[in-house]
Image (tube, rainbow, N blue to C red):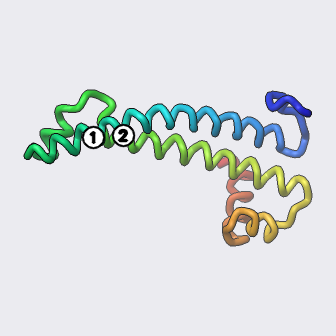
Amino acid sequence: MADHNDHRGGDGSDDVLRALDEMESVLRANAESERFLSRRIAEVRLARQNGLEWKAILGAEDDPGTVQLVSTILRRQSEASGSFRRAMVVALRAEGQSIPSIAQLFGVTHQRVSNLLRRVAQGD
């Protein structure tokens, strides 16, 4: 069994493993943030039920605020999943998979996969 930290391979799989490592890290960080957000939501709900205005509720929060937490969680997840998808598309293509078969695996159109590969090739 290969060590998941052994990121060798010329087919892009090392990039996939790095992306998976990053995704795992993000999931742990987001789990902690989501627990904090859940507590914060309860506080916000109670304050609103007690008649406070939204500006007063959000303005009284310590950083990171509720809206900041939501944005951070979504940004982390989006960035990590984007890196994973890019790395996986490249690795699958390097293994000889067709663009339509990759698109089917991902549940997207072949145009989306082609665009992703083009952006990767251009360094985006």
Q: Nearer the viewer, residue 48 or 110?
A: 48
Q: Is residue 61 above or below residue 106?
A: above
- CB contact under 8 Å: marks 1 and 2: yes
Which of the image's four quarters has the N terminus? top right
- Identify the residue at horizontal 64%, vertical 49% (top origin): 124
Other-residue count near label 2 (Cα within 10 Å), few / some / many at <14 / 14–19 / ≥20: few
Give the total of numbered labels.
Answer: 2
Q: Is residue 115 above or below residue 11?
A: below
Q: Nearer the viewer, residue 112 or 108?
A: 108
| Residue position marked by numbered label 2 in the rendering | 38
Figure quadrant of residue 17: top right
- The Cα–Cα distance between marks 1 and 2, rounded to whole angstroms, is 6 Å
Q: Nearer the viewer, residue 11 or 28?
A: 28
Other-residue count near label 1 (Cα within 10 Å), few / some / many at <14 / 14–19 / ≥20: few
Q: Position of residue 103 (x, y in %)?
A: 74, 67
What secondary structure is found at the residue carrying circle 2? Answer: helix
Image mark for residue 88: none
Q: Is residue 9 above or below residue 109?
A: above
| Residue position marked by numbered label 1 in the rendering | 42
Q: Position of residue 67 (x, y in %)?
A: 32, 43
- Identify the residue at horizontal 80%, vertical 28% (top origin): 5
- Identify the residue at horizontal 82%, vertical 50% (top origin): 91
Q: Is residue 19 left or right of residue 28?
A: right
Q: Position of residue 36 (x, y in %)?
A: 38, 33
What secondary structure is found at the residue carrying circle 1? Answer: helix
Q: Position of residue 56 (x, y in %)?
A: 12, 39
Figure quadrant of residue 89: bottom right
Residue type at mark 2: give it. Ser
